[in-house]
Amino acid sequence: MNSARRRVLVGGVGAVAGFSGPWAHHHAWAQAKQKKPLLIGLATDDSGPYAASGQDEQLGMRLAIAEFNERGGVLGRRIEATHENTAGDPATAVGVAEKMIRQQEVAFLLGGVHSGVASAMSRVAQKYGCIYFNSNSSSPSEAGAECHRVKFVWDANGTNFSISVVKGAMTGFGRQWVLVTSDYLWGHTTAKGIRRIVEANGGQVVEEILVPQGTRDFQPVLAKIRALKPGVVATAVGGDDQKTLRRQVQDAGMDRSVGWINNQQDWPDVYGLGRQALFGIFGTTWYWRLALAGVPEFVARYRKALPEYRLKTPGNVFFNGYMATRELLRAIQRTGSTSNLKLIPELEALRVPATDRMQHFDAWMNPLTHQLQQTVYVAAYNSMPDQPDDLFRILARVRPDEVQDADSAQACKLEPLAATPSYEP
């Protein structure tokens, strides 16, 4: 490997969001003899259909790193971050992962919202043995057919969210369903999970409408829905496409005439759209108004760190990026090592108390799929907010064991640990 490593200190976040965070150079580190810094690769979708979420999760990762550095780093090593934009493109992501691992010699790789990006980077990471954290891609395939021994998945997936919302929607809106599906891996696997759950509960999918990524005119889709007159429309459409769909549904006056569910609603995708654009039922893993210990303090730290950021309150994507990074660094502390062969078993046994994760139920890593099992919240538009950013009304909280993805568990075939290359930065 090339020993010349390009190191970007954590203050580089300003280039992404157009502001300076609290992550300037720490003089105490500069004045003391120090161990070799621990370099973490942040490979995020900062452009493309998931740009808002890619930038948001990067900020969460950087805050976790900054907080550890304020306490002295990890194992006596300062933590540094190098960043690359995957552009939400799997081919680009392969090049990014190769560069970070082979040229920059990153210790760990984090990021990826687009499922194709996450899948592509994880294959590269497995080849070298570099632990990779998929922080925000929610395709069921990520902990299913595309699982890897070095990959750990930190978001709930499409099936987890679908299980939590489908039964309620069927009771409230009827058993005739139309699926609107983004025509790529995440959309297909998510819609497949929705269909299975609907049919298992006595519902019927009367049509599935595929839409290409980058669709900006949903009028033909809406016309077909009007003609079919379903009780429920379930969308597996994300990022900028979802924003466009929501606006056009509202403009067409269809936001109240049919039951809409979006199995997951990412905070960066709805922030700033206006409450009128929030309709239907959806899932999330975290909300900034949860009445739980630690939440107000976390929100306060976020606002102090990011005073000029357009998202004035943290959401699920930032939360996932922060928590994934925090748990990686904690695992390094517990094992006293950066060896992948020591950290992988440690992460497979991970259990995080609810109070520590600011969720209602304990979270735990499934050792057979490497997906974190966590609380899922069912939410809707908040018609009576008492603060400007109080957009969600939490309808229910669902235990991790109630929303487990059995199909992914069957599809996942992790490589043996003994067959995984040793990697110790």
Image: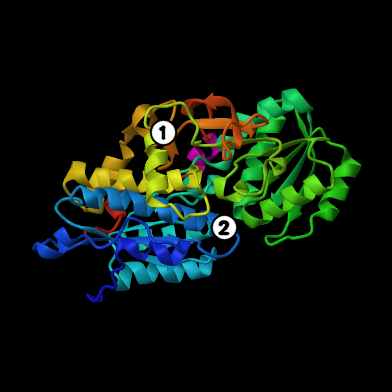
Which residue carries the number 2 mark? 50
Locate residue 121 relative to residue 106 in the image: left or right. right
**Label 1 – label 2 distance at C-alpha:** 26 Å
Work out whether residue 78 or residue 197 is closer to the camera in this orientation and state it: 78
For image coordinates 50% across by 57% down, the residue present is 54
Q: Label 2 is placed on what type of residue?
A: Tyr
Locate residue 30 relative to residue 281 in the image: left or right. left
Q: Which mark is residue 295?
A: 1
Note whether 395 is above or below 301 in the view shown. Answer: above
Q: Residue furthest left?
A: 33
Per the rendered image, the range of residues in magenta is 406-411
| Mark 1 crowd level (few <14, some 14–19, many ≥20, 10 Å Cα) | some
Work out whether residue 327 or residue 286 is closer to the camera in this orientation and state it: 286
Locate residue 84 relative to residue 77 in the image: left or right. right
| Image coordinates for residue 22, horizontal then vertical, percent | 33, 55
Q: Residue furthest right?
A: 227
For image coordinates 36% across by 54% down, the residue present is 62
| Image coordinates for residue 147, horizontal then vertical, percent | 45, 49
Q: Quadrant of the C terminus?
A: bottom left
For image coordinates 44% across by 34% down, the residue present is 373
Q: Is residue 413 something one can see in this rendering?
A: no
Q: Quadrant of the N terminus?
A: bottom left
SS at badge 1? helix
Q: Is residue 407 something one can see in this rendering?
A: yes
